[in-house]
Amino acid sequence: MKAAVFEKEGVLAVKEVPRPEIVKDDDVIIEVELCSICGTDVHIMSIPPGYKATPGTVLGHELVGKIVETGDKVTTVAVGDRVVVNPNDYCGVCDYCKNNLPNFCENIKAMGIDVDGGFAEYVRTSERVVYKVSREIPAEIAAFAEPLACLLNGFQKIRVMPGESVVVIGAGTIGLMFTQMVKAAGAYPVIVSEPSELRREYARKSGADYVINPLEEDLESFVRGLIPMGADYGIDVVGSQMMEAVKAVRKGGTVLLFGVNANARPEIVQSWITQHE
């Protein structure tokens, strides 16, 4: 089959590779209908990489597809089922898994990072991480199940209430989804900071009340011009804007760190965080 293989730093090669086969009794083989491009995939391909992946691995993890083969002990899905995938296969027996925290599994195998992923015609994964999805949902929407799950994990840590103010830093896919989510929760105002003109346009379409270009306007000054004491919540979707988020929120406010950039080394003023609680 054809697949896009991460060969080495900065090199993604489309090549012929062996089609995956059933190895364990709970394996399933999925024919990939669509696999979207995550920011993580882009970071993996950066030089130097902003996220580490194993050379020789097929990238991609935000996928929707059809099960075409199952292991002997698979019972919850069947050949022909349309599914989306949790790309982080967990062991089920480590201390974190036993405490119902499988996303922190000590033996986790991340699809498209540690093991072969969805930039291919077929992919193998475990029965426990596939979820049936309606055939009526367009593939380009179904593929958002995985990033939406990640977003909800973060969103549940802040629980925005109607009338609370939110600053979203970064208007990539996740930033736009956060914008839609906090607006649906009744937040006001929602302020989005994004240097890209195209992304700023989509932030407005996603419901942002105010959108600024941080290369032209100071975020903290803009926020405090609207809300003198600062916003209730700041969300860094970039992975390098922690202090910008901290400065944008009020005393006693909350900052959610969501973005991941392994190369970022921002200066942290810890006293500011402590003194402003």
Image: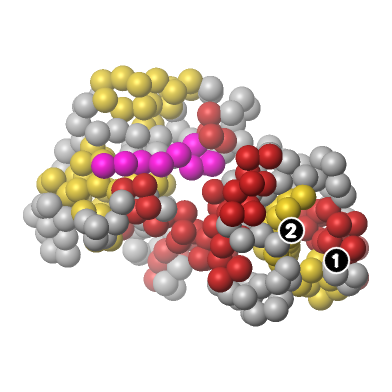
Residue name at image x 41 percent, y 53 percent: 144
Q: Residue 269 at what x, y percent from top left?
A: 88, 56
Q: Which residue lies under the disc numbered 1?
A: 226
| Magenta span | 33-41
Could one spot residue 221 in this view of the protein? Answer: yes
Is the residue marked by circle 1 packed among few (<14), some (14-19), or many (20+) residues within 10 Å?
few
- Residue 234: mark in rendering: none
**Figure check: 10 above or below 139:** above
**Residue at the bottom extreme, as displayed:** 162
Amino acid type, mark 1: Leu
Q: Is residue 213 above or below residue 89?
A: above
Quarter of the picture holding the C terminus: bottom right
Examine the rendering and report whether any part of residue 111 can be seen.
no
Label 1: element kind? helix
Q: Is residue 98 left or right of residue 15?
A: right
Residue 153: x percent and y percent? 52, 65
Taking the spot 26% from the left edge, 25% from the top edge, the residue there is: 2
Q: Pointer 2 and pointer 1: residues touching (CB < 8 Å)? A: yes
Residue at the far left in the pictured view: 72
Q: How many badges with numbers are in the image?
A: 2
In the rendered image, residue 159 lying in the magenta stretch gets the answer: no
152 and 142: which is toward the camera: 142
Residue 157: x %, y % from top left = 60, 71
Residue at point 38% right, 31% down?
A: 57
Q: Earlier in the sequence, mark 2 or mark 1?
A: 2
Nearer to us in this view, 221 or 11 = 221
Amino acid type of disc 2? Tyr
Measure the C-alpha gap from mark 2 to mark 1: 10 Å
The image quadrant of residue 216 is top right
Say the numbered circle drawn on residue 210: 2
